[in-house]
Amino acid sequence: MPDAPSTDFYAAFVKSGPGSFLASRLGLPQPPSLRRYQPGKPALAGPVLLGGSGRLVEPVRELLSDYDLVVNNGGARGAEKLGGAVFDATGITNIDDLKGLYEFFGPQIRSLGNSARIVVLGTTPELIEDLDEHIVQRALEGFTRSVAKELRDGATAQLVYVHPKASTGASGLASTLRFLLSGKSAYVDAQVIRITDKDAEAPADWDKPLAGKVALVTGAARGIGATIAEVLSRDGAHVIAADIPAAGEALSEVANKVGGTALPLDVTAPDAGAKIAELVKSRHSGLDIVVNNAGITRDKLLANMDEGKWNSVMAVNLKAPKQLVDDLLAAGALNEGGSVVDVSSIAGIAGNRGQTNYGATKAGVIGIVDAYTPVLAEKNITINAVAPGFIETAMTAAIPLATRQAGRLMNSLQQGGQTVDVAETISYFAAPASAAVTGNVVRVCGQSLLGA
Ligand code: NAD
């Protein structure tokens, strides 16, 4: 997937010979190159160290049988750098046992290679009855987020909470680990993902996890939406790319490129849902994946904001994603076993000056996920959201230089993300193998300092 044309001249400079020399002499940040997913290439650059002594360590070994696993405290082999380290912390039930994290990871930190992955596995704290166990499982979050801030060279750390009754071989864990232990999660850092006890089937081919599925992507003519269309199609889905009629030409290009269908459509139109329902019922057997990506900004300080700016942002970013799902469900056009993925923003988590309208809608999107999780679960449909941070797009290229550069550097990976980083996360959520993954909001922000 091609990267967006970068306006990050600073990163280009510090990667050059003289720039790198100058940056190390002056102690300036030197953004690492992130290793991203390429079909057919190994998921990680080195072996994965597997440790811990909970209920998941053995199942994980089986789920990842095609990975190069190094087992329990063997450490990296010789001078070889680790591609990742997975620690099953579900066996930790009291405060003293937390030392297992210190003992496992401490000696390994210096052995982690470029874009290495740390994954801690725990049990969902709010579902644990025992008080001590609840407390220490919750403690895993502080450990993971802190160690993420200490890692270098593009390495990241994540925490996965698994339902206490989840069948351990279930594919929700497999699909989550395969996302996290690969370049697909290059710009996802210090996140917590919860896995339910629902079973799901693994795909016939992990490189085509969406095979046979029909996906709608709104706002697909450019930016993040165009890349989502490409990634979902690469992963095997037939993509219906929707965008406003004025974006028609760019939309057709995207649809042609991915062998999909172009659908000129304003998501705020009262009949938007009905039109999509008609298309998917007549040409396909319904819709499996809905990605509510279309979004706009109309920034102004609240004191100066006219009503139009408030209303238009509400209509596109919040009313439309809710209405679309309601209308598709009412029309019976959203298939059982399907998935909805909404696009929030860290502005909806941290807030942003000049974006009261936008911030409200993007927090509202998280509200949609919370409210619809149980409703959609009845129909075996998942709903999750991504919350991008600073992503290199036309939208962020328009930000004044100093603010733009600050936005890039204010995260643990010291750079902006690529549109593909958001798209990969969406494809992971959308996959049938992730049927046990619902109700999550994952930030794609390189562990931004904002709202963390
Ligand atoms: P973009 O402006 O490049 O693309 C948005 C697309 O949505 C455009 O093609 C536009 O025509 C389409 N659209 C707008 N209104 C529409 C409507 N009424 N009906 C149908 N299509 C409509 O923006 P982007 O940067 O690619 O952002 C995509 C999503 O990601 C948005 O929801 C945005 O809020 C969110 N986001 C972006 C960033 C970032 O850094 N770029 C960060 C956080 C969140």
Image: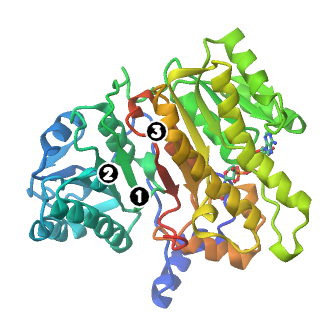
Q: Which of 215 and 180 is in front in this view?
A: 215
Q: What element carries label 3?
A: helix
Q: Which of the labelled discs sits on residue 318, or is there none?
A: none
- Please name the amino acid that badge 2 sits on: Val
Q: What element carries label 1?
A: loop
Q: Is mark 2 on a helix, strand or loop?
A: strand
For the residues labelled 2 and 3, the Cα–Cα distance comes to 14 Å
Residue topped by disc 2? 160
Q: Residues within 10 Å of mark 2 (few under 14, many from 20)?
A: many
For the residues labelled 1 and 3, the Cα–Cα distance comes to 14 Å
Place residue 247 in its image quadrant: top right
Residue topped by disc 1? 191
Answer left or right for 139 relative to 208: left
**Image: 320 above or below 120:** above
Residue topped by disc 3? 428
User: Where's the N terminus, which quadrant?
Assistant: top right
Q: Residues within 10 Å of mark 1 (few under 14, many from 20)?
A: many
**Do the CB atoms of the residues marked 2 and 1 lie less than 8 Å apart?**
no
Answer left or right for 191 relative to 296: left
Residue 120 percent location from the top left of the image: 26, 56
Residue 430 percent location from the top left of the image: 50, 34
Place residue 220 in its image quadrant: top right
**Label 3 beta carbon less than 8 Å to ligand 1:** no
Place residue 272 in its image quadrant: top right
**Can the viewer see residue 291 in this picture?**
yes
Residue displayed at 65% across by 58% down: 392
- Please name the amino acid that badge 3 sits on: Tyr
Please tell me whether mark 2 or mark 3 is closer to you in this view: 2
Residue 72 percent location from the top left of the image: 9, 53
**Image: 250 above or below 275:** below
